[in-house]
Image (cartoon, rainbow, N blue to C red):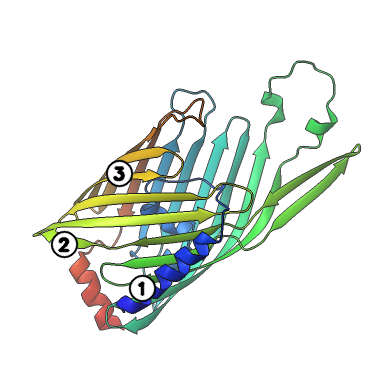
Amino acid sequence: MKNIYTYILLLGFTFIGFTAKAQQQANFLFFESNMSIINPAFTGSQGQLFGLQYRTAWMGVEDAPRVASFSYNTSEKKNTSWGFNFTSDRVYVENQGVVSVDYSYKLKLSEGTNLYLGIKAGANYNNIDTDRLNRITSESNASLAGITNYMNPLIGAGALLKSKNTFLGFSVPNILNSKRFKDQQGVQSTATDKPHLYMSGGTSFGLSSGLSLRPVLLYRMVADAPNQLTALAKLDFKDRVEIGAGMSNNDYISALLFLKGASNLDLGIGYEFGQRTSSTALRENTMEFVVRYRFDKVTKAETTKKEVKTE
């Protein structure tokens, strides 16, 4: 199976080399805790759970970006799982988000290695409160009159290759290039939801008894925007405590703490430090929180045994 992972990684990063596009959807530092939002194949792969996540960017700046998400995944039954996701992304007068229902099906490739295939269906929405805009004059503005709220459908797909200590994921949360045109008083407005491509991967290396190193990556691309790569390295102690640090190619470095398993409850806090460079005039820090409840809490060893028995 190592050769399969190697070929997929080479293929993925070869594709990255020929692409200079990137993501516009909300980013999360704890992306592993809500992967079903961007990849429906992850639905149910960690058992039945629900999670809440909140991210506040540009701390200290009024009306700066605020992102909140809610996820629920069912447990696996006959190799299938269902899930629901909601994301709200607010910045100044704009509030956009995603509502989706996800489905995942598991295929056994070998002992301890599974391929999950997922589909996603729902809608993107966008609300803009033009009444909150600070205007110099109260005269009618045809451009502002052309701005209206909208909702576009979405259909997404994803794949997840997962073994005991390694995972690789590829997904397009919305394959539709949805556009909405409006002509009002000679002024044309367009709303577009462009497809995003996500690639993720991670593995685990045992360092000593109860201590392991877990590097994880997330790469995001969409047309007409810079691409984004987030890399994290985490130290995991007995699958109870994770301490990590990371960086991204948008000049942010990060630190996080994740506590797992206390009364089936997972808690995490993370902080991103903006690095001022010659290309940025102003940059502020970001804080993120995550709360997740796992209904059927089991250890990694128990999870592996369960998969072997039921398949």
Going from N to C along the chain, the mark reached first, 2 or 3, is 2
Query: Where 93 sits versus 297, above or below?
Result: above
Query: Where 238 sits versus 89, above or below?
Result: below
Residue lying at 48% horizontally and 66% vertically, measured from the top left = 14
Q: Which mark is residue 268?
A: 3
Q: CA distance from mark 2 to mark 3?
A: 22 Å
Residue lying at 85% horizontally and 24% vertically, measured from the top left = 140
Amino acid bearing label 2: Gly
Give the percent coordinates (x, y) of residue 4. Answer: 37, 77
Binning the other alpha carbons within 10 Å of mark 2 as few (below 14), some (14 to 19) or many (20 upward) gives: few
The C terminus - image quarter: bottom left
Where disc 1 sits, the SS reads helix
Give the percent coordinates (x, y) of residue 75. Answer: 36, 68
Where disc 2 sits, the SS reads strand
Q: Residue furthest right?
A: 186
Q: Are marks 2 and 1 in contact (CB under 8 Å)?
A: no
Q: Which mark is residue 206?
A: 2
Going from N to C along the chain, the mark reached first, 2 or 1, is 1
Amino acid bearing label 1: Tyr
Identify the residue under disc 1. Answer: 5
